[in-house]
Image (cartoon, rainbow, N blue to C red):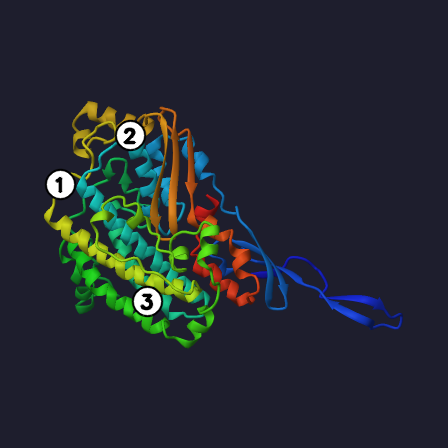
């Protein structure tokens, strides 16, 4: 809700007339107002204090911290393996990418060699997460600017990818699937199917289950064959839409110099024409083996960033296809063969007292990580998500510092929005792709 923050009068009466009215000159004063934190376009709990001159924004002061949960401090009070779930809840639209940075930091300190199959699975799920994030961004940003149908389209595909998260980890969002040394378990041999209901039966039920007859890799293959046509549908709705272009072209222009000065990463940087992507520049997992392009913008406005995200979805589909092809023909372990970081199998635990004790100690006390410090970053959908980890040799971190891309981007809001209309602030908040779990931490 947009509400007045002060009761400041719009007109400052310079000379009072005893008979009423105003004589002399009347000065128009700026109006200060709140944007958020309840505003639906604030993407969570962002509070902007705006100084307005009519409809034109003169100054913006972002107030953050309303979703601060002390994640970094909580991680320092818990064993290493108990904090993976906290990472999911930071940027709760890019869950596995957050896990990846934290898990890689632990692996660096412990000098663990992750099995090749697990690396390919991580690469694949990082890109599935990128699609989930960009679909959410596309639907919500279009809705903010007045396009209702796109959200329904985007969530249709998002639902299909959420089923993959659920099939592999048991949870639709907070997966805790990546573990130090690999992943929780291998990909399932079959996908869950829809059951007959009053809404799905007969031919409709068969159509809904058509992709689910085989394994998860078969399902993802079918999805990747179909998805580019779905992206074409989004582009039909938006790319040449006159209203969409009026709301985004020339709005929120970020020059390459400004992008670098404000520490921007991800689409905010590439939309301004700077070719920087950690998957290419500092490859991790199996990105060095992947064939994909880095989409770039030219103008650095909201429309260019929209085009970059659309192109990134197409590139992510290419990467997923390559991972599926490799995983089909290369079976193998998905967890390092080191029982300091690998819990016993469930079957073994039910038969062996030693395995039961090991399991209990593993999940209550965890493992000790050698003393040292490291910084690990991944190319998350919103930009560079990094984890700075310090260990003193104990079973819990001495220090955890998380580098969230949205926090750096938000600090540039005053410089970018100043001089735009109030309605353009909504487009700018959308193009930042903000999620306050990671901004406030």
Classify mark 3: residues with Cα within 10 Å, few (<14), some (14-19) or many (20+).
Answer: some
Q: Mark 3 points at which residue?
A: 153
Left or right of residue 334, residue 13 in this image? right
CB under 8 Å between callouts 1 and 3?
A: no
Q: Quadrant of the N terminus?
A: bottom right
Q: Residue 379 placed where, x, y %? A: 34, 49
In this view, 333 is above or below 51 = above
Name the residue furthest right.
Answer: 18
Residue in the image at 53% along x and 67% along y: 423
Q: Name the residue under label 1.
A: 332
**Front-most of residues 229 and 166:** 229
Foreground disc of the pair 1, 3: 1
Q: Name the residue under label 2.
A: 110
Q: Rounded to the nearest whole Å, what is the CA distance between mark 1 and mark 3?
A: 37 Å
Q: Residue 259 placed where, x, y %? A: 45, 55
Q: Residue 293 placed where, x, y %? A: 27, 58
Name the residue furthest left.
Answer: 329
| Label whose residue precedes the other's in the sequence (2 or 1) | 2
> Is there any visible trace of residue 200 in the rendered image?
no
In this view, 44 is above or below 334 = below
Q: What element carries label 3?
A: helix
> Is there any visible trace of residue 47 in the rendered image?
yes
């Amino acid at each position: 809700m947009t509400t007045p923050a002060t009761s400041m009068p719009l007109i400052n009466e310079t000379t009072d007339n005893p008979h009423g009215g105003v004589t002399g000159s009347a000065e128009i004063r700026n109006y200060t107002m709140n944007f958020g934190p309840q505003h639906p376009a604030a993407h969570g709990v962002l509070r902007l204090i705006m100084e307005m001159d009519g409809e034109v924004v003169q100054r913006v002061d972002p107030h953050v911290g309303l979703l601060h949960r002390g994640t970094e401090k909580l991680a320092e009070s818990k064993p290493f393996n108990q904090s993976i779930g906290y990472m999911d809840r930071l940027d709760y639209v890019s869950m596995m990418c957050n896990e990846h940075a934290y898990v890689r930091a632990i692996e660096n300190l412990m000098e663990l060699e992750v099995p090749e199959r697990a690396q390919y699975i991580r690469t694949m799920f990082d890109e599935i997460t990128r699609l989930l994030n960009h679909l959410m961004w596309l639907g919500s940003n279009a809705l903010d600017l007045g396009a209702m149908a796109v959200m329904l389209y985007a969530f249709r595909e998002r639902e299909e990818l959420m089923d993959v998260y659920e099939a592999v980890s048991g949870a639709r969002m907070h997966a805790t699937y990546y573990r130090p040394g690999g992943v929780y378990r291998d990909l399932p041999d079959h996908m869950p199917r829809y059951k007959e209901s009053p809404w799905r039966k007969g031919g409709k039920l068969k159509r809904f289950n058509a992709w689910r007859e085989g394994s998860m890799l078969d399902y993802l293959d079918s999805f990747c064959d179909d998805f580019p046509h779905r992206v074409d549908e989004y582009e039909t709705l938006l790319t040449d839409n006159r209203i969409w272009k009026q709301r985004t072209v020339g709005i929120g222009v970020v020059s390459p110099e400004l992008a670098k000065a404000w520490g921007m990463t991800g689409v905010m940087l590439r939309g301004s024409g700077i070719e920087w992507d950690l998957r290419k520049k500092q490859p991790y997992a199996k990105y060095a083996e992947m064939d994909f392009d880095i989409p770039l913008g030219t103008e650095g406005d909201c429309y260019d960033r929209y085009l970059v995200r659309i192109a990134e979805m197409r590139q992510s589909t290419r990467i997923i296809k390559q991972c599926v092809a490799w995983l089909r023909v290369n079976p193998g372990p998905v967890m390092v063969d080191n029982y300091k970081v690998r819990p016993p199998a469930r079957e073994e635990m039910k038969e062996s007292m030693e395995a039961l004790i090991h399991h209990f100690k593993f999940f209550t006390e965890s493992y000790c990580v050698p003393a040292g410090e490291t910084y690990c970053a991944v190319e998350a959908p919103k930009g560079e998500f990094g984890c700075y980890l310090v260990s003193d040799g104990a079973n819990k971190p001495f220090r955890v510092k998380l580098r969230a891309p949205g926090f750096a981007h938000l600090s540039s809001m005053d410089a970018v929005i100043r001089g735009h209309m109030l309605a353009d602030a909504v487009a700018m908040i959308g193009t930042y792709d903000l999620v306050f779990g990671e901004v406030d931490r």
